[in-house]
Image: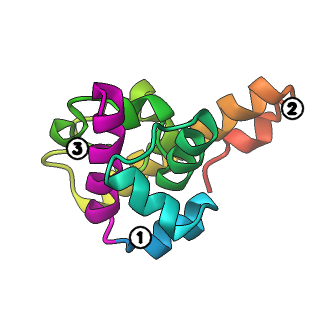
């Protein structure tokens, strides 16, 4: 097993367990078979790009993190989703309410940037309700 395959296998298993998902739940979220999830976690398949993207979408993280050798040592930003690499937050010491506000701001900003990339910049979407 090559290194990137091992990292993908390890990180998939790590993230699935961390989220409390079964292989069946991950398969459903990634739109793949349970057998495919099992093979990935055991390192029996070399990840194809479409599988890497499907798993990244299921976990709501950038695909590059699935190949990150230090993923299990990173502090996840619970609200950043695919924008984890773009957001660095120190939320220690914040109240749950403050963390929720930060998460809402991240979601709004992420959606705004996503909309800009698609060419539909609507300034009303920046209003936090």
User: In the rendering, which numbered label is found on residue 120?
Assistant: 2
Q: Residues within 10 Å of mark 2 (few under 14, many from 20)?
A: few
Q: Quadrant of the N terminus?
A: top left
Question: Which residue corresponds to the image point at 40% horizontal and 27% vertical from the top-left?
Answer: 85
23 is within the stretch colored magenta: no
In the rendered structure, the answer to whether residue 128 lies left or right of residue 95 reads right
Q: Quarter-wise, where is residue 72 in the image?
A: top left
How many numbered marks does the figure carry?
Answer: 3
- Up the image or down, 104 lies above or below 87; here it is below
* Percent x, y of residue 81: 47, 45
18 is within the stretch colored magenta: yes
Farthest right residue?
Answer: 120
Question: Which residue corresponds to the image point at 64% horizontal and 40% vertical from the top-left?
Answer: 50
- Up the image or down, 4 lies above or below 61; here it is above
Q: Residues within 10 Å of mark 1 (few under 14, many from 20)?
A: some
User: In the rendering, which numbered label is found on residue 91?
Assistant: 3
């Amino acid at each position: 097993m090559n290194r990137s395959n091992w990292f993908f296998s390890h990180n998939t298993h790590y993230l699935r367990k961390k989220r409390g998902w079964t292989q069946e739940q991950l398969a459903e979220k990634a739109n793949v078979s349970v057998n495919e999830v099992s093979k990935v976690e055991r390192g029996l398949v070399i990840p194809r790009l479409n599988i890497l993207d499907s798993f990244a979408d299921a976990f709501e993280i950038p695909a590059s993190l699935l190949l990150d050798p230090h993923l299990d040592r990173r502090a996840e930003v619970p609200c950043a989703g695919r924008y984890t690499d773009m957001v660095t937050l120190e939320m220690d010491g914040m109240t749950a309410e403050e963390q929720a506000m930060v998460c809402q701001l991240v979601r709004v900003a992420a959606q705004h940037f996503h909309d800009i990339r698609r060419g539909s910049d609507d300034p009303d979407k920046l209003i936090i309700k």
